[in-house]
Amino acid sequence: DLLMMCFPHITHICITHVLDNFTDADLADSGQAWAHTFPGEEEQEEYLEAVRSDPISRGHDIVRAIHASGLCQDEFLDTFKTGNLKNWFRSHAGEAMQVPELELLWDVKTCWDSSCIMINHLHTLQPALNYFLALPNQKELEGYALSPLQWLVLEDFKHILQVSPAVISQSNVANRRAQQVPLRVQQRMSSESLPCLGSAVPCFELLMSAWETLGETDACLRPWTDVGLKWAVEYYQQMDNTRAYVILMCKPFIPS
């Protein structure tokens, strides 16, 4: 009972294992999991190839390349602002759209939720990045551009890191973008949020429920949610042996 694990660290460990297994998942089993997701074997193999190319690392390379010089950053910012003013950017449906003004951020090991934020910003800035990397005066950066399927894989992985509570209650894949369970769990239990030990088990159960339900509702993501769940269950079982969590959850209802 004297050993109480650092909850934000445990959450970070689970998410790190998911990230580390992004391209190391058993693709044979994954292919079986994706059998009913794509109309044919060709589309399925193309998705697997996009996974093997590691879009997360490639997205990190995009951020690093643009941040490599102040001139490149200024050119991207100018393209970004002008593109919004002149409607250069297009949605997947081909319609003009405004890209939200977000910064290109990269993940930092000492900031545990930075991987999710980096992926989220990359996905949001996709139209502006596609346009910028295709400009004739950015020839040296054209090799960093992601294919549509690589962007799709990156978007899918973003959903793993920010699962919607609607998934938990409704098993509705379409609503999974509403809020961000793993990210919010990390932030809720961070030192900046003044976390309470009594909130650890409920928050951790929320994270596990989110991944479990997402894997059930979207087989395409299950190979990775299962990795996170495997580690989460292992730590959860260790938490069962510490009575302090239960005592502190009951404390508000115990008269002093």
Image (cartoon, helix red, strand yellow):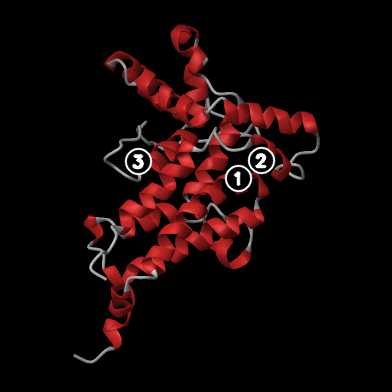
- Quadrant into which the N terminus falls: bottom left
Q: Is residue 180 visible?
A: no
Where is residue 11 shown, x and y percent of the image?
38, 53
Q: Nearer the viewer, residue 107 or 90?
A: 107
Disc 2 marks which residue? 30
- Quadrant into which the C terminus falls: bottom left
Marker disc for residue 65: none
Q: Residue at x 45, y 43 (%)?
A: 17
Disc 3 marks which residue? 114
Residue 187 placement: quadrant: bottom left
> Secondary structure beneath disc 1?
helix
Sequence-first disc among 2 and 1: 2
Sequence-first disc among 1 and 3: 3
**Mark 1 touches mark 3? (CB < 8 Å):** no
Position of residue 179 relative to residue 35, above or below, is below
Q: Nearer the viewer, residue 21 or 148?
A: 21
The type of residue carrying mark 1 is: Pro
Number of other residues with Cα within 10 Å of mark 3, as a class: few under 14, some 14 to 19, many 20 or more: some
**Mark 2 touches mark 1? (CB < 8 Å):** yes
Q: How far apart, in angstroms, are the residues tagged by discs 1 and 3? A: 22 Å
Number of other residues with Cα within 10 Å of mark 1, as a class: few under 14, some 14 to 19, many 20 or more: many
Marker disc for residue 223: 1
